[in-house]
Amino acid sequence: MTTRIDWLRGCGTALVTPFAATGDVDEPRFRALVERQIASGVPLLVPCGTTGEAATLDPQEQRRLIALTVEVARGRARVIAGVGSNATADAILVVAPYYNKPTQAGLVAHFRAVAEAVDVLPVVLYNVPGRTASNISAATTLTLARERDNIVGTKEASGDLQQIMAILRDRPPHFRVLSGDDAVTLPLIALGADGVVSVVSNEAPDLMARLTELALRGEWAAARALHYRLLPLMEANFIESNPGPAKAALAALGLLQEHYRLPLVPVQEQTRARLRAALAELGLLQGAAHVAA
């Protein structure tokens, strides 16, 4: 039977991981960030992805963050866990292997093995060639979608609209396509995509959730107006490597301490100034609390 996950739709937030000055995960602030997302109407939570600095988390920390997300959500939002999690989440997000640059045949074999290993747990592919140095082609994505019932979607961050359109045109009915880039969420939904895994929703969850829902309802004028309001912040989030700018913005909002794990370091002052300008334009800096380091 084909795995159907009708809930894989709308705005998902790629959650940042707050750290304390000691370098440990700041669990109270993480809980607060998750609660803020849910209160703002975000239906999908994605811990331990790129934005969550998953590459610097040890397995115990990763499992703990996923468990915390599930615990705080309490069924109020779905949890799509970064790969390597236990099965407490509703689905897992599996990035293409990085560094060794597999062929398309190798990618099919890899994701097939993952899907078989987790059996019926839904698997969402994650295609981000700018980080992995390998692209999951449309043909490979469609092969996996047709072959494995529990491969249920893809987070597409290739930036290749022709490739994404090929997936949208030929995908099986159960297979969902989520934008992996905030700035192309609106056009991709217009082409048939189902939502987004968002970075900007860390800072403006209510606005990004609303933008996504407006687009999914076909209310294009309102969605377009909100898109252009959010676009300066979307762009500022990627002036430097993600999640550096997003963390700087959240610190400016008083939601976490701006600590990173190497090789990430604090953003440059010009980046910080541009972020603050974008936040101010959205009215988000009003009433922001100071967070002690």
Image (spheres, rainbow, N blue to C red):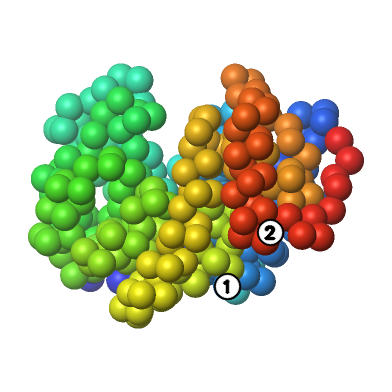
In front: label 2 or label 1: 2
- Taking the image as drawn, is residue 193 in sight? yes
Residue beneath label 1, please?
A: 41
Q: Position of residue 128 (x, y in %)?
A: 34, 38
Q: Residue at x 53, y 49 (%)?
A: 233
Amino acid type of the residue that numbered disc 2 sits on in the rendered structure? Leu
Q: Residues within 10 Å of mark 1 (few under 14, many from 20)?
A: some
On the rendered image, what quadrant is the N terminus found in? bottom left
Q: Is residue 232 left or right of residue 72?
A: left
Residue beneath label 2, please?
A: 284
Q: Is residue 120 left or right of residue 237?
A: left
Amino acid type of the residue that numbered disc 1 sits on in the rendered structure? Gly
Q: Position of residue 240 (x, y in %)?
A: 52, 30
Q: Mark 1 or mark 2, which is nearer the start of the sequence?
A: 1
Q: Secondary structure at mark 1?
A: loop
Q: Nearer the viewer, residue 113 or 248?
A: 248
Residue 187, quarter of the rendered image: bottom left
Q: Residue at x 77, y 33 (%)?
A: 24
Q: Residue at x 34, y 30 (%)?
A: 130
